[in-house]
Image (spheres, rainbow, N blue to C red):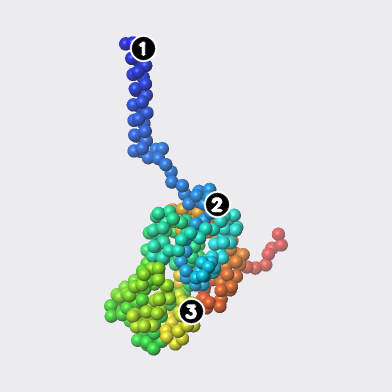
């Protein structure tokens, strides 16, 4: 065999071996592009992309200027300051479609209060709670059919005012599974639930009491809290993030715990006290007492 033929065979063998190796690697997952994690992207860009929804007092939006404010706005801006990261408020979304934005990588976190539910864990994870909210049942002021026995509401002849994809829908389904629902779109103002209740479009609604008291300030004598002394649940107010992002969650959790320990969160709740919130504060992770002098 001539030297040229031998050289050609060697080159062809190398090309075939290289192509085969790439084929095997691609089918075995070796050499595949590894997707950048949220933590890696945040560190690389120096910013956290926040989606949000307007829900007062956790988050306000000035209708004229678009400027945001509120408990969660202040908290996230402080988180950014402590982490030396910019908080970029990129998109207003409905509570029922938060997970869709995570799936399409439009934002890194939903930076207003979210109450974790079993349904939401399918498409998201959650930070530690900033505080808790009691969850109550509301009825019309002159409706006494359920006094002393809210289990009567668990009947197909009664209707709950709920918001698509919202905890009002989830809690009504969990606690009163036999009752029917009258839904509003997920982008609608949550207070519309109480408007529908007041106008006899439903028999009851479920939410946090500050929503009721804000409504009563403008519509006195229309509705009342059926469970003021015994809430049907206590919900954690958290920040919702993409699933499977351990390092990013750890970064947020550690920073939020620092805000809790330092009194920043308590000061925020006090700052917005005029909006009638009824919040349950987190217990400190330690017992305050005398120092040992060291």
Taking the view exactly as shown, the residue that stands out farthest to the left is: 156
Describe residue 47's horizontal placement relative to residue 24 as left or right. Answer: right
- Which label number is shown at residue 46? 2
Q: Which residue is mark 3?
A: 214
Taking the view exactly as shown, the residue that stands out farthest to the right is: 293
Image height check: is 287 above or below 85?
below
Q: Nearer the viewer, residue 235 or 10?
A: 10
- Which label number is shown at residue 3? 1
Point out the image quarter for the C terminus: bottom right
Which residue occupies 37% across, 67% down? 165
Q: How many marks?
A: 3
Image height check: is 211 above or below 187?
below
Which residue occupies 41% across, 87% down? 141
Q: Secondary structure at mark 3?
A: helix
Which residue occupies 37% across, 79% down? 196
Describe residue 72's horizontal placement relative to residue 27 as left or right. Answer: right
Q: Are marks 1 and 2 in contact (CB under 8 Å)?
A: no
Image coordinates for residue 28, horizontal then vertical, percent: 35, 38
Q: Nearer the viewer, residue 14 or 292?
A: 14
Which residue occupies 37% across, 80% down? 197
Q: Earlier in the sequence, mark 3 or mark 1?
A: 1
Image coordinates for residue 8, horizontal then vertical, percent: 35, 18
Q: Nearer the viewer, residue 233 or 28?
A: 28
Q: Residues within 10 Å of mark 1 (few under 14, many from 20)?
A: few
């Amino acid at each position: 065999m001539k030297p040229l033929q031998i050289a050609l065979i060697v080159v062809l063998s190398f090309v075939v071996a290289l192509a085969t190796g790439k084929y095997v690697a691609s089918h075995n997952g070796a050499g595949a592009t590894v997707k950048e994690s949220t933590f890696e992207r945040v560190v690389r860009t120096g910013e956290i992309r926040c989606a949000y929804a307007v829900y007062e007092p956790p988050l306000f939006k000035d209708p004229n200027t678009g400027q945001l404010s509120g408990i969660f706005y202040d908290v996230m801006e402080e988180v950014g300051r402590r982490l030396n990261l910019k908080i970029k408020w990129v998109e207003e979304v409905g509570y029922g479609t938060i997970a869709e934005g995570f799936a399409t990588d439009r934002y890194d976190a939903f930076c207003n209060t979210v109450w974790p539910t079993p349904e939401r864990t399918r498409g998201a994870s959650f930070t530690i709670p900033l505080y808790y909210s009691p969850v109550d049942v509301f009825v019309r002021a002159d409706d006494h059919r359920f006094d002393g026995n809210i289990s009567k509401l668990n009947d197909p002849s009664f209707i709950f005012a709920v918001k698509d994809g919202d905890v009002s829908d989830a809690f009504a389904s969990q606690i009163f599974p036999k009752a029917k629902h009258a839904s509003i779109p997920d982008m609608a103002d949550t207070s519309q639930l109480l408007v529908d209740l007041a106008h006899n479009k439903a028999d009851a609604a479920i939410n946090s009491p500050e929503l009721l008291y804000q409504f009563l300030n403008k519509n006195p004598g229309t509705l009342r809290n059926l469970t003021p002394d015994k809430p049907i649940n206590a919900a954690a107010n958290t920040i919702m993030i993409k699933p499977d992002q351990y390092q990013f969650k750890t970064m947020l959790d550690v920073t939020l715990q620092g805000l809790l320990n330092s009194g920043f969160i308590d000061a925020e709740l006090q700052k917005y006290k005029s909006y009638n919130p009824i919040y349950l504060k987190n217990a400190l992770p330690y017992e305050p007492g005398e120092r040992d002098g060291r």
